[in-house]
Amino acid sequence: MRHLDVVCHLPLRMLIRDFSLLDEIERRYAENSLTHVDFLIYNKVGKQPVLAIETDGFSYHQEGSRQKERDRMKDRILELYGIPCERLSTKDCNERERIESRLKEIIRSD
């Protein structure tokens, strides 16, 4: 997987430039300079996104919280634009294996 690289804290508005698939609330959220993906694995050759990775703090991302609502909105936006996303909880383990497994899945389907 030498053709892949990673960037941290990429603003969503740099990843998605055409907001035509979004409603007004989603567009405002995606355009906000503070809205970002924690990590983005991309193909170095074509500069195409391969997998977005989000790290979710246990207490900050609890069901019913405002952050959880934003997480769902970001997931929907990424899905609309065909960008797979893997969410990792700070209380889980085996992150490396999960990411590698997901990348293999994505690469096989291409």
Image (tube, grey):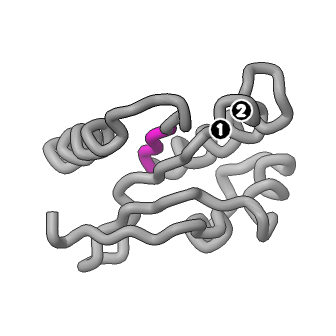
Residue 32 left/right relative to 46? right
Kindly identify the residue that appears in the image at 58 percent across and 57 percent down.
Answer: 37
Residue 84 left/right relative to 33? left
- Residue placed most toward the observer, 30 or 69: 69
Q: In the rendered image, which residue does mark 1 sit on? A: 57
Relative height, residue 28 to residue 67 (above, below): below
- Kind of residue indicated by mark 2: His
Outermost residue toward the top in this view: 63
Q: In the rendered image, which residue does mark 2 sit on? A: 61
- Residue placed most toward the observer, 107 or 55: 55
Residue 88 left/right relative to 71? left
State if disc 2 and disc 1 touch (CB < 8 Å). yes
**Kind of element beneath mark 2:** loop
Relative height, residue 97 to residue 51 (above, below): above
- Residue placed most toward the observer, 17 or 3: 3
Q: Main secondary structure of the magenta part?
A: strand
Neighbor class of circle 1 (other Cα within 10 Å; few <14, some 14-19, many 20+) is: few
**Kind of element beneath mark 1:** loop
- Kind of residue indicated by mark 1: Gly
Image position, residue 32 (x, y; %): 81, 64
- Residue placed most toward the observer, 53 or 29: 53
Q: What stretch is highlighted in magenta?
A: 83-87
